Image (spheres, rainbow, N blue to C red):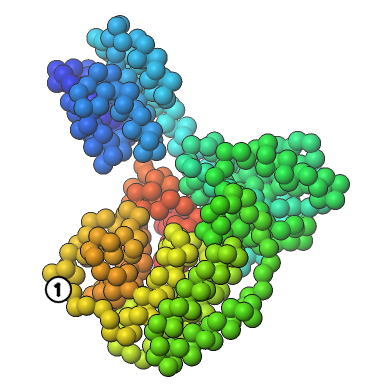
Amino acid sequence: MFTVLIADDEPWVVYRIREMIEWERLGFTVIGEAHNGLSALEIILEKKPDVVISDIRMPGLNGIELLEQIRFHELRSNVIMISGYSEFEYAQKALRFGAFDYLLKQVDKDKLTDALERLKATLEEKQKVQKGLELLLDDLFEIFEYDENMKLQNFLSSRGIDCDYPHFRFISCLYQDSSFPDAGETQPAFSGIRYLRFRTGQNKVSFLINYDELKYPTGLLDFISDHLSDARCIGISGIGVYSTPVAKLYQESDIALCSFFTRLESRIIEYKQAADHPLAWMGTILQIEVAVKEQKPEQVNRLLDELCTECKERSMQIDQLCALYNQIVLLSYKYYSSTDADYEIEYMNYDQLFRQYRLVEELFGKLKAIFRQQTGEELHISNEMVKKIIEYIDANFTEDIMLVDLSKKFHITVGYVSALMKKETGKTYMEYVMNKRLNLAKELLQDTSLSIQEIVERVGYRDYFHFNKIFKKYFGITPGKFRKL
């Protein structure tokens, strides 16, 4: 059943619409009604109906403003607008803003039925496309895993694809929103370039391009300028050949894309193979270890600040930054693992680091807080405050709340919020949130009317690939396969 919200400031109009249609026979169910635009928006944000039947003129928000808010929040609700003859200009504007249809008052039963039947066909087709996309994503998820060794030649031949050129690259792109065309596998060709396109995240598309780097060296730049002008940031892999693993090229493009974290001024980043532990950084880490052993917290802070500055000045690639971070984490475990302190710091891969921190300064601020905590500088916090923090997390775990946000809200340091969570729950903050999200996802997967992408969004994730990874790690099976059990 597709869900419907009816919104009109005149209750008798809502009642008439509700009573004139045999909703269940048409495959719909009415889940609510509203008599002004603001209350309609509240219901839409909470219940995310498939269909909204709305009057053009309402207090609070009019129909056009309500439609704009639906688009602003990237909701999939389809709007059928109701208007009078004198409001025809508004109705035209509603169609330009993406309304499915508009009907004139008084609403005619046959015309509303016709609109609903057409909309149902559209929604069912979208469901088919979404299911096909989920099957494709499940397949790609396995192939793109970093330890997967499927060669490009095998990947292409298994799909019956012949490529004309000797060189390959992956290009991964982030967009401002998810409004770009859905990216199933395609195989267009133009002026010396062939490519496959995949949706690899909520706002992310990846391209496997095939061209001749020697005969057509500008092909890569031409492709980007012609096809990717709307992308917010772009990561480019190194060059591959038929024997190159698919996962290797994809991971390189993804690392380059995530390196936007350290190069906020850059829009296009190309992957470069980097040394794991440059001698200059290892020297600084050795100095940090000496300062930790000699219990000189001010020197530790200064050295971490110097590393932070160097990382920014060098525009360090995120896999390199991740290796550096994990070296410092190793120090904390080496010298503090036997203490009674409860704190949240763990080894991370580049993807986790990219998702957990917004800025390089925030990452190093967390490291400084962990070392500072060992000096006993933190203040005691009441049990009542701890309870409020956990209640807040429980009420908002599907939102993107970072430790730094909790720190600001409750006026305590990031390190201490982290320590409190570990002490009270036995889990790090990220583990605690992930556990609640995944268990909610497990429940929602029982509802087959929800697509996996809808579930991903409801539990607080945006990236299908990231959700697949953690779900499989947590439950030992992908969400798609879990649903089939």
Image quarter of the C terminus = bottom left
Q: Specify few, some or many for label 1: CA neighbours under 10 Å numbering under 14, 14-19, or 20 or more.
A: few
| Image: 283 above or below 240 | below
On the image, which quarter does residue 333 sit in? bottom left
Give coordinates of residue 165: x percent, y percent. 81, 47
| 291 sits to left or right of 205 | left
Amino acid type for the residue under numbered disc 1: Asn
| 140 sits to left or right of 32 | right
For the residue pair 403 and 139, the one nearer the viewer reads as: 403
| Image: 229 above or below 456 | above
**Residue drawn at 29 percent across, 13 percent down:** 83
**Residue drawn at 19 percent across, 70 percent down:** 386
Give coordinates of residue 480: x percent, y percent. 46, 54
**Residue farthest along the top direction in this orientation:** 85
Q: Mark 1 points at which residue?
A: 383
**Residue farthest along the right direction in this orientation:** 215
Image quarter of the N terminus = top left
**Residue drawn at 73 percent across, 46 percent down:** 220
Q: Element at badge 1?
A: helix
For the residue pair 180 and 413, the one nearer the viewer reads as: 413
| 448 sits to left or right of 167 | left
Give coordinates of residue 235: x percent, y percent. 62, 53
Whether residue 217 is visible here, answered yes or no, is yes
**Residue drawn at 64 percent across, 47 percent down:** 207
On the image, which quarter does residue 110 sit in? top left
| Image: 281 above or below 114 | below
On the image, which quarter does residue 142 sit in? bottom right
What count of labels does the image hold?
1
| 15 sits to left or right of 456 | left
Give coordinates of residue 334: x percent, y percent. 45, 89
For the residue pair 286 and 121, the one nearer the viewer reads as: 286
